[in-house]
Image: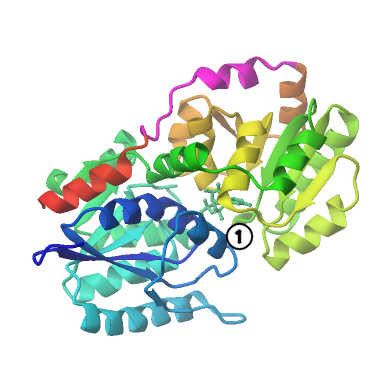
């Protein structure tokens, strides 16, 4: 039920992490009669999105279906701009909400800006400091900052970045990260699939290393080097195992099959829905990942994380002590050192979460109501 003066909000997402992080905001908006909510998916990810939308019972009102074979970032951008223009004409929204740093997020913000529709940027103020890494995400984040009306920042550091770039303090809101809200919801309300429950049973007593890797910057030698080192580690330490939900990107699949297929205590899985994946994070001894979202989830779960990247736009995870950046270090040495001495691994549980308390979505909706 909405009131006649309800503000109309378009919530736009296109990839798995955007959906995960906007789901709690959609939930809060839909439960508030002061808002009318229109959900738009660009479907920049297709198969990865569906199971997640089911968990949160999100109904997509418009699907822009931007995915084609060998599409370019420019074609994604052009399709989102064109598709949104038509939706704006029909729906006449007051606000468009975008999340993070994807091409969908940038195009959505730009489309709103061009039509003088207020743009809310969820997870604003992240910077790696290198315009070309991660690509194109760092540029997308900076561009959205230039044109957004509301900047919802997860941490003090993110707020500071925005202020230093000239954004007025009145437009910056410290809310925490909505991923913590999502994680809390899933852990409270959902149970893993039988397949994952069985895998946990089967690997009981082993130190589980959970891996995700899919970033463009990791493709090629970097990724094969990481996979080889993980393979050697698990082969040598017989009380460990490796669990890897393999990203569908062909650059990841091919190399994974070449290096990790049919290895003892190595479990290669299809991409998992969020409930199964969070369950595995919770049950992991150590997480290794180049993902952005996982850097926020590991501190929320008190799990040690080795970040398979050169740099990170989420230094809070490193500063909190929960994560270590692999960068130029040897992954193999880091794995073996932490296997021999588990002081860091055991200390992580008690470290405070820098990404908020799980009320970010509530705060965002209250702010939109008041402004
Ligand atoms: N994730 C998932 N299933 C998987 C692997 C990851 O649900 O099999 C979740 C993970 O918890 C995180 C998000 O997907 O919230 C991360 O997405 P991704 O790594 O694709 O993107 P990034 O965070 O690097 O932008």
* Quarter assignment of residue 179: top left
Q: Is residue 253 magenta?
A: no
Q: Which residue, given by chain and number where applicable, does mark 1 sit on?
A: 216
Q: Which residues are magenta?
A: 341-357
What SS does tag 1 mark? helix
* Quarter assignment of residue 356: top left
Is residue 261 visible to us here? yes
List x then y, in percent, for residue 225: 77, 47
Observer-nearest residue: 204 or 46? Answer: 204
- Please give left or right for residue 31 compared with residue 79 in the image: left
- Please give left or right for residue 179 compared with residue 187 in the image: left
List x then y, in percent, for residue 7: 15, 63
List x then y, in percent, for residue 89: 22, 84
Q: Residue at x 56, y 21 (%)?
A: 348
Q: Is residue 351 above or below residue 152?
A: above
List x then y, in percent, for residue 56: 45, 54
User: What quarter of the picture does the N terminus occupy?
Assistant: bottom left
Q: Is residue 243 above or below residue 19?
A: above
Observer-nearest residue: 192 or 263? Answer: 192
Q: How many marks?
A: 1
């Amino acid at each position: 039920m909405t009131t006649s003066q309800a503000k109309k909000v378009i919530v736009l997402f296109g990839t798995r992490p955007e959906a995960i992080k906007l789901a709690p905001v959609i939930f809060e908006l839909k439960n508030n009669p002061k808002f009318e909510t229109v959900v738009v998916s660009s479907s920049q990810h297709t198969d990865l999105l569906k199971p997640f939308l089911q968990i949160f019972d999100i109904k997509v009102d418009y699907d822009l279906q931007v995915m084609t074979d060998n599409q370019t970032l420019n074609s994604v951008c052009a399709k989102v701009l064109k598709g949104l223009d038509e939706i704006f004409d029909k729906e006449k929204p007051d606000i468009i909400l975008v999340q993070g740093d994807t091409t969908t997020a940038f195009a959505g913000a730009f489309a709103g800006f061009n039509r003088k529709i207020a743009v809310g940027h969820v997870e604003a103020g992240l910077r790696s400091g290198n315009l070309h890494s991660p690509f194109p995400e760092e540029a997308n984040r900076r561009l959205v900052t230039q044109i957004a009306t509301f900047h919802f920042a997860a941490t003090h550091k993110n707020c500071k970045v925005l202020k230093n770039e000239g954004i007025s303090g009145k437009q910056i809101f410290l809310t925490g990260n909505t991923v913590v809200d999502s994680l809390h919801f899933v852990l409270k309300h959902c149970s893993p699939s039988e397949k994952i429950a069985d895998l946990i049973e089967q690997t009981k007593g082993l130190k589980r290393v959970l891996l995700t890797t899919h970033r463009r910057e990791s493709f090629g030698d970097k990724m094969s080097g990481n996979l080889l080192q993980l393979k050697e580690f698990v082969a040598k330490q017989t009380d460990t195992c490796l669990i890897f939900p393999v990203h569908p990107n062909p650059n990841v699949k091919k190399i994974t099959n070449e290096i990790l297929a049919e290895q003892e205590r190595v479990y290669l899985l299809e991409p998992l829905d969020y409930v199964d994946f969070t369950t595995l994070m919770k049950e992991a001894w150590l997480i290794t990942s180049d993902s952005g979202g996982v850097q926020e989830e590991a501190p929320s779960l008190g799990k040690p994380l080795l970040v398979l990247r050169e740099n990170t736009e989420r230094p809070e995870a490193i500063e909190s002590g929960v994560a270590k950046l692999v960068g130029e270090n040897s992954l193999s040495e880091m794995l073996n050192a932490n296997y021999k001495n588990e002081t860091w691994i055991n200390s992580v549980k008690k470290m405070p979460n820098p990404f908020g308390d799980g009320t970010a979505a509530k705060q965002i909706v209250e702010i939109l109501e008041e402004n």
